[in-house]
């Protein structure tokens, strides 16, 4: 479900404080997701590729996987094609504890490096999926267990990750934070509140991210 902003004013204020965002308008409507046993959200990014980027067509082995080279002129749909803007960060909060399953896994830490071979964070450049750092072929299912980060759902635990860099650095998608929402085991459900934060204050959203009236008459 997607909450109307005035249903969750206290939560939004707390999330604004937690993320350090100065303008509440950067916070998109709060989304709450339920995962039943066996339900998985496969590997994905919370950032937005530009229009016609290879990732939108399922292609791999591309020089510019997320279409970031055209971001300075083309932008992306949610940011209303404003140059260099993107979804900047996500804060998700586990609403219940799930035992032995339902992890959020970041399997590609270290995959995305700068094109000069250095750190992506020192010199952000678009993700090139022709090959991994060790020279072997890149594929969508690639997963390095040694470098994976796995987070166990624990009630009240908030997790922040930056899915793109700041606009002044090009709004480039960070391929290191591709992640998977793994399924809970039988007899358990998983509930997660997700706050997506844009790098701009004016944005558009797909239908599944827009509230369609109040979910409840309670105010949280």
Image (cartoon, grey):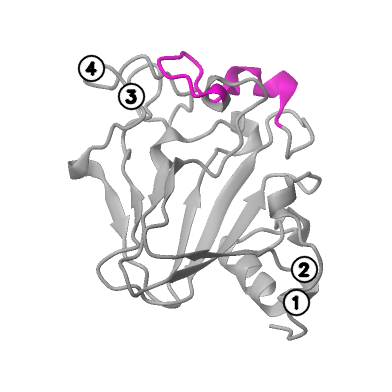
Q: Is residue 19 above or below residue 10?
A: above
Residue at the location (71% across, 56% down)? 28
Q: Is residue 219 above or below residue 65?
A: below
Among numbered discs 1 and 4, the one appearing first in the sequence? 1
For the view shown, which residue lies furthest in the left direction?
Answer: 146
Q: How far, Cα to Cα, is label 2 from label 3?
A: 39 Å
- Relative placement, left or right, of 185 versus 21 is left
Q: Is residue 199 above or below residue 192?
A: above
Q: How far, Cα to Cα, is label 4 from label 2?
A: 47 Å
For the view shown, which residue lies furthest in the bottom direction?
Answer: 218
Q: Most prominent secondary structure in the magenta stretch?
A: loop
Residue at the location (68% across, 45% down)? 199
Q: Secondary structure at mark 1?
A: helix
Residue contact between numbered discs 1 and 2, judged by CB atoms under 8 Å = yes
Residue 130 point in image, percent of width and height: 37, 14
Residue at the location (48% across, 28% down)? 124
Residue at the location (30% across, 66% down)? 185
Q: Is residue 93 among the parts visible in the rendering?
A: yes
Residue 168 point in image, percent of width and height: 64, 33
Indicate which disc residue 4 carries.
2
Indicate which disc residue 97 carries.
none
According to the picture, the residue beneath numbered tag 4 turns out to be 136
According to the picture, the residue beneath numbered tag 3 turns out to be 139
Among numbered discs 2 and 3, the one appearing first in the sequence? 2
Q: Is residue 58 above or below residue 135?
A: below
Quarter that holds the C terminus: bottom right
Q: Which residues are magenta?
A: 57-76
């Amino acid at each position: 479900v997607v909450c109307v902003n005035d249903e969750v004013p206290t939560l939004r204020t707390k999330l604004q404080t937690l993320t350090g965002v100065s303008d509440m308008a950067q916070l998109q409507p709060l989304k709450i997701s339920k995962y039943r046993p066996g339900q998985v959200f496969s590997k994905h990014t919370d950032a937005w590729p530009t229009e016609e980027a290879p990732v939108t067509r399922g292609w791999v082995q591309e020089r510019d996987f997320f279409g970031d080279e055209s971001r300075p002129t083309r932008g992306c749909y949610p940011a209303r094609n404003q140059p260099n803007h993107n979804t900047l960060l996500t804060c998700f909060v586990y609403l219940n504890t799930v035992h032995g399953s339902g992890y959020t896994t970041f399997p590609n830490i270290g995959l995305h490096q700068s094109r000069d071979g250095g750190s992506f964070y020192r010199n952000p450049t678009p993700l090139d999926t022709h090959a991994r750092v060790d020279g072997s072929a890149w594929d969508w299912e690639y997963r390095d267990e040694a470098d994976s980060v796995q987070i166990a759902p624990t009630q009240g635990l908030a997790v922040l990750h930056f899915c793109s860099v700041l606009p002044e650095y090009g709004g480039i998608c960070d391929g290191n934070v591709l992640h998977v929402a793994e399924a809970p085991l039988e007899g358990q459900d998983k509930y997660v509140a997700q706050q997506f934060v844009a790098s701009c204050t004016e944005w558009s959203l797909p239908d599944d991210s827009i509230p369609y009236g109040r979910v409840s008459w309670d105010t949280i």
